[in-house]
Image (cartoon, rainbow, N blue to C red):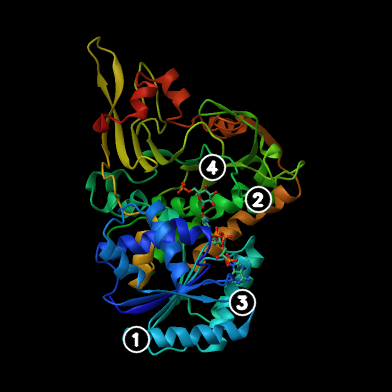
Amino acid sequence: MDTMSFVLFGATGDLATRKIYPALYNLFIEMKMPESFSVIGLGRKEISNDIFQGLVEKSLNTFSRNSPDNADTMKAFLSAFRYSQLDVNRKEDYQKLLQLVVQREKELKLSENRMFYLSVSPEFFDVIALNINESGLGTTEGWKRLIIEKPFGRDLKSAQELNENLSKAFHEEEIFRIDHFLGKAMVQNLEVLESSNPYLQDLWSNHYIANVQITANETVGVEERAGYYDHAGALRDMFQNHMLQLLMMIATQLPKRGDASTDNLKKKAIMESLRPLQQEDVIHNVVRGQYVAGKSKGDSVVAYTDEPGVAVHTHTETFVAARLWIDDLFWNEVPFYIRTGKRMKEKSTRIVIEFKEPLTKQSIEEDGKMANLLVIEIGPKEGMFIQLNKKNNKGELEPVRIDCYSNEKDAPEAYEKLIHDAMNGDSTFFAHWDEVEMSWKWVQPILNAFNDNLIPLQMYEAGSYGPTGSDELLAFEGFKWLLDSTTWNSASTIKEEEYAYPTSRK
Ligand SMILES: NC(=O)C1=CN([C@@H]2O[C@H](COP(=O)(O)OP(=O)(O)OC[C@H]3O[C@@H](n4cnc5c(N)ncnc54)[C@H](OP(=O)(O)O)[C@@H]3O)[C@@H](O)[C@H]2O)C=CC1
Ligand SMILES: O=C1O[C@H](COP(=O)(O)O)[C@@H](O)[C@H](O)[C@H]1O
């Protein structure tokens, strides 16, 4: 890998502390960092290099998956770190930064490869990109790259404006938009799932698939992020980015591992085939919800509107579910259901593919017989299972699962994989502009309908599976959300406890 400078805006912030330093350290001890590199942290605070290195060390002691117990390794790692005070709006600070970058390039004999990581509020993205350009920081003999965090805009127009501004300083292939869901191990596995399993290839179409369900439920509420979340809501925070990326990944026909540009084309093709929603259709295809007081893991929790920092009469949604259709040859007539919510009964991010009875074209549950399923568990458990039917000792049909769960305790985190890919210039698992733009385009009528209050805000109890409208969405086509523990108890011989501890982990 090329030697380089890693210039981190927002070096004193939460994301840097919890994710970025641990990721760099784990890459370092696994020999995945360049032979020589410099890290320059930036923030408004005036702190010395020693204090900065102390902050980084503290972050590793608290958050690193590989325990930083070797003093020599730690010393070698920290020796790469320097700090420079910078206010994003002060041009002279960029000149000071340029001097430091060049000085470290000389001291460490680095090529002029520069990675700029913007771990700051999105309102600063364009001013930083502009100043990188104007200050000369972006004029290098090597490569320059920009990593940016979400959110990328708050609607179609602002995303387009932001992209236009970034494009003045960076080419599309130099911009790495992080969507951390794309760094999750099972999402990266989707690529090979179909291509390396011929039997799935044959089943991967509307002939055999009844519906696809994509869920990202969380037990946490808004936590300390009301300032951001109450202006964003579940649609912007999760749906427009993570959920639609999951949809693109699962729906893409991937004959074999492509490169970033072919994978991007395939994802784009899915978005192009996604049936647009007219504003008047939103009410029939989208459910928005907000949690009221309830129980989370046995503890009483307050309603969203009683969370600190949330406006009392807010209409911000903490839950959203939608029915989507992909009008292409493979997926025509297969509904995709997506839901995501906070303060749900359990934390689970998963994709469920329900197969149908080929003769009836329906999924069927009769005499104990359950639909065949392929379930991809993205988090917090990582693994997958296939659900089939077998006869038990009483001669009754019952569902069984063939599962495979990851037992890797110290598997690399999403940020590690993504930062490593960006260092290698591989943008496969990043959100490309056309995907982002098409996602905003698809979501925009929903944003408008929410803004105009055209869609009822359905209340759901904290610790539940969301508002009733979410179940009705699937019931319309004769389906239901699968694998919610209540569904299992009522419809199958598989008990909730079995679900909680997959067989391979017992
Ligand atoms: N935290 C998280 O879990 C996640 C964060 N993100 C995104 O990552 C980005 C960073 O978030 P997070 O770390 O939580 O934010 P924090 O508020 O914790 O940190 C913000 C950082 O920006 C710096 N900063 C603020 N104003 C200026 C300025 N005028 N000039 C220079 N630096 C400034 C702060 O420096 P100082 O402390 O010196 O003022 C600090 O280092 C955001 O885009 C967020 O949306 C995305 C996903 C998850
Ligand atoms: O991006 C976000 O994701 C998290 C959920 O991520 P996970 O990896 O823990 O599943 C969510 O809590 C947060 O609101 C959102 O901004």
| Residue 436: mark | none
Query: Who comes first in sequence, dot 2 or dot 1?
Result: 1
Residue 450 screen position, x and y as percent: 70, 48
Question: What residue is shown with label 4?
Answer: 340
Furthest toward the top, the residue is: 394
* Label 3 element class: helix
**Distance CA(mark 4)–CA(mark 2):** 15 Å
Q: Which of the pair 300/332 is nearer the observer?
A: 300
Q: Which residue is mark 3?
A: 127
Report the residue marked by disc 2.
446
Amino acid type, residue under disc 1 in the picture: Glu
- Is residue 426 in sight in this rendering? no
Contact between marks 2 and 1 (CB within 8 A): the answer is: no
Residue of label 1: 107
How far from the left and from the top, in percent, is residue 349? 44, 42
Q: Nearer the viewer's eye, disc 2 or disc 1?
A: 1
Q: Amino acid at mark 4?
A: Thr
Q: Nearer the viewer, mark 4 or mark 1?
A: 1
